[in-house]
Amino acid sequence: MYRTHTCGELRIQDTAKQVTLSGWVQRSRDLGGMTFVDLRDRYGITQLVFNMEASADLRREARRLGREFVIQASGIVAERSNKNPKMPTGDIEIIVNTLTVLNESVTPPFTIEAETDGGDELRMKYRYLDLRREPLKNNLLLRHRMAFETRNYFNTHQFIEIETPVLIKSTPEGARDFVVPSRVNPGQFYALPQSPQTFKQLLMVAGYDRYVQIVKCFRDEDLRADRQPEFSQIDCEMSFVQQEDILNMFEGMVRHLFKTIKGIEFSELLPRLTYNQALEQYGNDKPDIRVEMKIHDLTAVAKGKGFGVIDSAPFTGGICAKGCSEYSRKQLDELTEFVKKPQIGAKGLLYVKYGTDSGIKSSVDKFYGAEDLKQWLEPFHAEAGDLLLVLTGERIPTLKALGELRLEMGNRLNLRRKGEFKPLWVLDFPLLEWDNEVKRFFAMHHPFTSPKPEDISLLDTDPGKVRANAYDFVINGVEVGGGSIRIHSETLQKKMFQTLGFTDEDAERQFGFLMQAFRYGAPPHGGIAFGFDRLVSLFAGEESIRDVIAFPKNNAARDVMIDSPAEISAEQLQELSIKVEVRKV
RNA sequence: GGUGCGGUAGUUCAGCCUGGUUAGAAUGCCGGCCUGUCACGCCGGAGGUCGCGGGUUCGAUCCCCGUCCGCACCGCCA
């Protein structure tokens, strides 16, 4: 028997018990006459003590122990004379009488501690060592609990988890597919699913009216801190539901997770914004409403006073930064630089300072008197001491730039606090998005999303105006979920494919199976998928989803630990009928 | 595809702007001392292809160009 207890469970009540522990040497402190060893496992740390007087041989062995040696120690649980209130097992220690080295360890390349000295690169290469560290261990534990509670919630609501295939078929819409060659079908390829979208709809047709799956999805696109080529979704679909039913069910899931995992309860119904409202008020379709400052349209009050920049622009708008009227020239210059960055794209920044002495000063004093500027302040209910930041230009880009500026001010004013969670729904997304490069519409969500019934007639006249029964779930400016009511009529689905520029043959070849299924009594249905990694990283307070994934890939989609992707042998290629020609740069 | 930042002891960084002596610090590692530590303490020691290639220069860790690697962001990601 390797152990009678774990390294996290012994307490003062266990005093005088003979116990055996196994684990890793976290650190040892050699005081000459005696040696302390911190023994670590998944459950915690327990101090072992070796005393010169009790056993010189044992203590000599203990001095040899290096960091991360795997050892087994038996001894008597004893109350410490010097207790350590900082650790759960800090009242006791083990007076060791038998020590076995189960495996030695070379010195690890970085310290296995909460505050490690290791950089990202090294930690990735030695991920199995990084995972020994407390913060990552806690993240994986959190992830497990969240998966468990998710299944628990859906189980009590009659959902069943059904696995869908991973080797499927490439489709043209959406992200690039990862493909897998088929040996038994030379020259043909499977694709890995970007999501189980069509399968869950087919499950609805099959009558499994409440489906859930925590499932891996794959997208071959460039990576970010919150994007991995393979990631997990909480994928859901329901039949005989309208949008309201879905919002309630999945708001329930989020509430359940916050309550059981974080002990947070949201008393009121979560806020809902339409896509247009989100854009107008926050300049963003995934607003971080921890930052309260909203955008207001100043076009009407600002125009016509002879200031060419504003007069010639279709839109002028601003945000009000509370208590920032005393911002220095330097701070305002920094903000100007911020909005002029290519990613933000504004030409410049105007400001109005509503001084603590109620005096009004602005960068446009030449064109606007105090009375004019008071009108600007009005929609914000600005108070003395506030600072108005104003951008002008084309409507949508200016709103988006104001949205970025809002977040920047939120950061500067420390309004985006980690422990605070502000979830909301964003509703009524546009059904279609115009792509100026290929001159056609694309589905904003996916091609199975149903238009709002009252907007269907617009499909022929003004497709860009059609709103969808589509919704996103947003927490703290992070899009954590998205879904829609689906089309369940073959006719409407055909119409949708037409609008997207599919020929009948394209539609039939790629999605014929779905449209055929719709002929056999497809129930009204809809669903949603939550980005599980993002949800866990939010709960964990981590910036990057890599910190909640056991074995993530790096910026360039490589696994630096196993060194993948990698070439395959000529034999493998031949078997697959594949000839490789690496494109020259 | 693009932009920015970074690459110097095992590790995390300083030095580089303003080129020139033996390239430093902390931590880790090794050795010694130490009987109540828990980031133990004290003393000593070892440890460097300054990512790689080219250029400028009498001379390059330092300046320039290229390249590779890492991170963040833009494009992209229904």
Image (spheres, coloured by chain):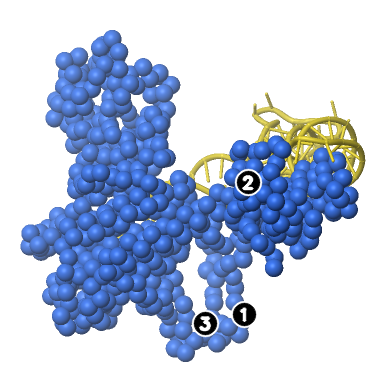
Chain colours: A blue, B yellow
- Label 2: how many Cα within 10 Å (few below 14, some 14–19, many 20+): some
Q: Are marks 1 and 2 on the same chain?
A: yes
State which chain disc 2 sits on: A
Task: Using the numbered discs, state the Cα–Cα distance from disc 3 to disc 1 in whole angstroms.
Answer: 11 Å
Front residue (pair A56, A242): A56
* Residue receiving disc 3: A578
Front residue (pair A33, A355): A33
Circle nearer the viewer, 3 or 1: 1
Q: Is residue A147 left or right of residue A111?
A: left
Percent of width and height locating residue A231: 44, 62
| Label whose residue precedes the other's in the sequence (1 or 2) | 2
The N terminus of chain A: image quadrant: bottom right
State which chain disc 1 sits on: A
* Residue receiving disc 1: A569
Tag shown at residue A452? none
Q: Residue type at mark 2: give it.
A: Ile
* Residue receiving disc 2: A12
